[in-house]
Each structure stands twice: as C-alpha cells, then as structure tokens.
Image (tube, rainbow, N blue to C red):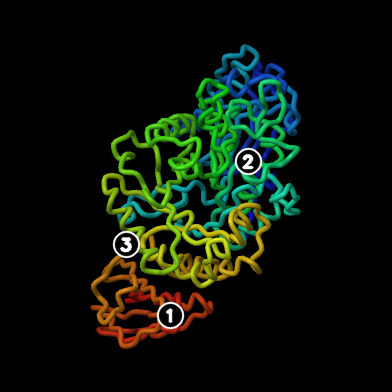
Amino acid sequence: MKHYQHAISLSVFFICSLFLLSSASPAELGRTAVYHVFEIHFSGPAMGPGDAPARDVELSARIRHESGSAEYTLQGFWNSDGAGGMRGGRYAIRFCPTQPGRWTIVETASNQPELRGQHGGDDIVAEQSDHPGFWLVDSDTPGRRWYKRSDGSHPYIFGNTHYSFLSGYKYEGRLTGNDIKKDVEQNAAYFKKLRFTLFGDLYPNPYEKPFLDDDGKPTDSGDYSFRPNPRWFHQRVDLAVQTAFDCDLIADLILAGPDRLESRSTLRAAANGADPSPYLRYIAARYGSYPNVWLCLCNEYEIKTPKYTEADIARFGALIRSSLPYPTPLSVHSTPRTLWSPEFLTLPEWADHRIIQNKIRRLAPASDVMQSVWNDAQARPMPTINDELSYEGEGDRHSEEDTIESHLGAFLGGGYATTGEKSGVKLGQYFVGGFDPAIHHAADNLKWLREIIDSNISFYRMAPGSNVFSNLPDDFRVLSNPGKEYALGSCHEAKSIQAHLGSGAWRVVLYDVINMKANTLSEDATGTFEFGAPKSRAALIHFKRVE
C-alpha cells in the first residue's frame, strides 16, 4: 500500500497544537500538504451529552487561496474536548488545500458570539505533495463512465464490504477481535474501496453507541442523529477514515442502514422533528474534506423500514451536497428490482454516480446489467458501481470463480464493482470485518486484475462493444477504443477467434485471471490475427496498437 509523505515531514493529518483566538495580528496556523487534511481548532461554548451542538451551533469559515483562484466554505462541528470526550468547548473545521501556497481564513461565521470571527485573517500554508487528490467524474470519458483523480490519473476500482466492522461485535454479542486500523490497512493491500456503515447495525456494540438520546445516554437509534456521540465518531469513524486516507483507500460511508430500524432511522430523525439536516451537515463537516471519502445516503432505501422515496433521497442529497465544500462522490444504494429508479431523472440532480445491486455469477450478465442501467439513464450519464455484485461464500453460494468472473464482467460492461465474504445469512466478513484473504479467496485475483488494468489498459478511453472480432462466442464481452485498443473478456475455452486489427502493429497479451498468469501472444500482430481463449472462467485478452 502507498503512504503519502509530506514534503515538510509533518503528520499526514496535521492537528493544530494550539488554540489560537482571533487577534489584531493574523497568525500562521500551520503548514500542511496539498490534498491533506488540516484541522483548525476553535474555542466556543462548552457542551455536554445532553446538548445538541450539531443542531444548535452553527460554524463555518471561508478560506481563500492567495491567488484568489480558489475559495471554499467549510462547515464546522463540535469536537468536545478534541480527544473523544463527552464534554468540552472545542470546535473544529477540517480543510483540504487543493493547490500550494498561502490560504487565508477570510471570514468565520457563527450563531455563537464566542466563535464568530475567530481566526479571521489567519493563514495555512500548503506545500506541494504527490497525493492524487479527489475522485472526479471524468466528463471526457465515453459516456462519463469513469472517474479520474485531481491529478488526472484513472485508478480502477474493485471494492470490499464490512458493513458493521466499526462496532467490534458480531452475533450473540461476541467480540470480533478485529482492529479497525488493521482491517483498513489489510483491505487497502487488495482493494481500492471499502464500504461500511457508521454504526453497529445488526451487531451493535453493547457499550458504545453512535448517538446520544434526550437524556444524554448512548443509543443506537438514528432518530437521534442530530446528537452524534463524539466518542464514537472520534475513536471509530475518524480512525477508519484517517487510516484509509493514509493508504489512499476509498472510505465509502453509508449514512443509513443497511438492516436495522435503528440504523436506518438516521434520515428519518424523528426525535428532531423529521429534520436530518444537522446529521448531514455534521457528516459533511467531519468527513467532507477527505479526498478519499465517498458517501452513500442509504442502503436499499426503498424496501426496508423506514423506507424512503426518491423525492426523500433527492432532498437528503441536496441537503448534504449544500454542505460539502468539495466534489465528494455521492449516491444511494438501490435494490435489484429497480437498479436505478427513473424517478430520479425527474428530480433535481444530486448524485454523481449510480449504485446498483445485482448479484451475478457470470461474465456476460455482469457486463450487460451495467449497459442496461446506463441505457435506461441516458439523460444523466454517470459512473455505475454494482456494490453487491458477488459475495463469496455459503451465504449466497457464490464460489471464488463466480466472484472473479462476474467482476471481470463488470469491468467489461464499463463500470466498477464491489465484493464481500459472506459465510452465512448476515454472517461473515461482509458484516463484521476481520478481512482475511485466506477465506475471501477471490481477493488476491481481484487485486491482480486491478493492477493489470491500472498498469496496462487505458480503460478510461474505452466503452463496451466492438465489431473487430469474428467467431466470437455470444457470452464474451469487449471494451474498445476503436483502432487503438481492445480488452476482450472470456469465460471458457474458444478456438479460432479472429481479430481484424486494421493498420499498425499490435501487442496482444492474454491474462488468465483465475490462475493469475500472463502470456504474450504477439508483440507485432497485424491485419487479421487468429487466437484462442483458454480453459478459464475469467481471462482478459488485451490488444493495443504499438505503432
């Protein structure tokens, strides 16, 4: 895994060591690196478990680059004592500089006199770094299917799932024994994204809870989402997000769900008059400045209690988007029966990608479902991610080879995909974490395939379909950049396939994803090239013109 280093040998996540109140002379608050997160501390009204600062205290700051070319308005949040305690008067704003130079706090706004104007005129100095930055929809890719990073790179994404690993507990109230930091680091060695909820969900922690009720007591009930528990978010969510940042792993945060009423009620917010805006603003403030954070509003929003309508989801999306200072990827998880509701097309835009759920074992259907979703949503072309493509294990009875083949299919369909290990109904690593590639057997194959794609295939210039192959089996699929590059996926043996390559010389390499072996078929193929597909459920044959 890659750990990004500051040019100035500071911590990746710079925390100011001093409380600096506004004064007549502006101060330099500290130095950090571009695309790293700098926390600015504020001193304000002391709060405790029975208070509701996420709802009642407003804090924001406008921070402008010295060139005047960039300015961000960032929300602040109550940070208790700064160490996860239950009482304190510390507040924070998290800032991510997007270019080197001096950044100035030009305004601090608050409904609290003690906070208003703090750090006005103070500076943060950002130095250049090698961090690739935020994930942005690349409008120049075919159909806007693919993401790029701020630096212009296009890493491919296979993800993993640990729904409730922040809890530390599993069935029958047993400790999992896993460590959040270690789990994230081990996932980063194999995957590019880890999706998880902010709560314990089916396996709640009996002692620590994500929210506080009206009496200030810890609770799992999302109806109290307007009162986040600072200890839970500091010790668990912050740890997961920061560790993922250190490893450049996407932390895909699920804000409601997946299963229990308590976890799904965060957007209902019944104890706050059905107003989830304090919770959404808090999430945006606490995590919206991390380049590695993605947000999923709800898992299976339309089928479990409480259910949410498309209009509800669009409203929630607009609320959190208004508080996000950066282009944080945002979507919602739908169900197999709808994939992506056409009702979203009639509502104001809020999502930058589609999340679908369709458990598939074979290459062609995994590819085709990506295409069918994209074709049904032509009005808003955007990246598509099948976030429950194949859970390996007895829970869904998907084998290792099922998972590998279907993920290759998702790639060839012009999208991304996520897996998980499911040993039984609501059991396994996909819920409680404890990532172990010796059990989640497909993990090493998916890592191998992802690294092959990143190193060799310009997929971001490609789209599904091709007419250059003849004698091609019906269940093979192709990504193509016509006349320049083709990626053909096979799932069984086939002979005498012909590629009509046209002008130039082509390099042809066969990648057997099941056996993780590469074989160069030709360095200078020309004209009509005849080849075969191996006896493998997942192979990728790559054609690239070299002259």
- Front residue of this view, candidates 134 and 235: 235
Q: CA distance from mark 1 to mark 3?
A: 20 Å
Judged left or right of residue 304, residue 9 is right
* Earlier residue among tags 2 and 3: 2
Q: Which residue is mark 3?
A: 463
Q: Residue at 34% across / 51% down in the picture? A: 144
Disc 2 versus disc 3: nearer the observer: 2
* Earlier residue among tags 1 and 3: 3
* Mark 1 crowdedness (10 Å alpha carbons): few <14, some 14-19, many ≥20: many
Label placed on residue 510: 1
Which residue occupies the extreme top position in the image? 113
The disc labelled 3 sits on which kind of residue?
A: Ala
Label placed on residue 199: 2
Q: Position of residue 365 (x, y in %)?
A: 37, 65
Q: Residue at 73% across / 37% down in the picture? A: 208
Q: CA distance from mark 1 to mark 2?
A: 43 Å
Q: Position of residue 213 (x, y in %)?
A: 66, 25
Q: Position of residue 86 (x, y in %)?
A: 74, 27
Judged left or right of residue 394, residue 528 is left
Please tell me whether mark 2 sits on a helix, a strand or a loop. loop
The disc labelled 1 sits on which kind of residue?
A: Leu
Residue 2 shows in the view: no
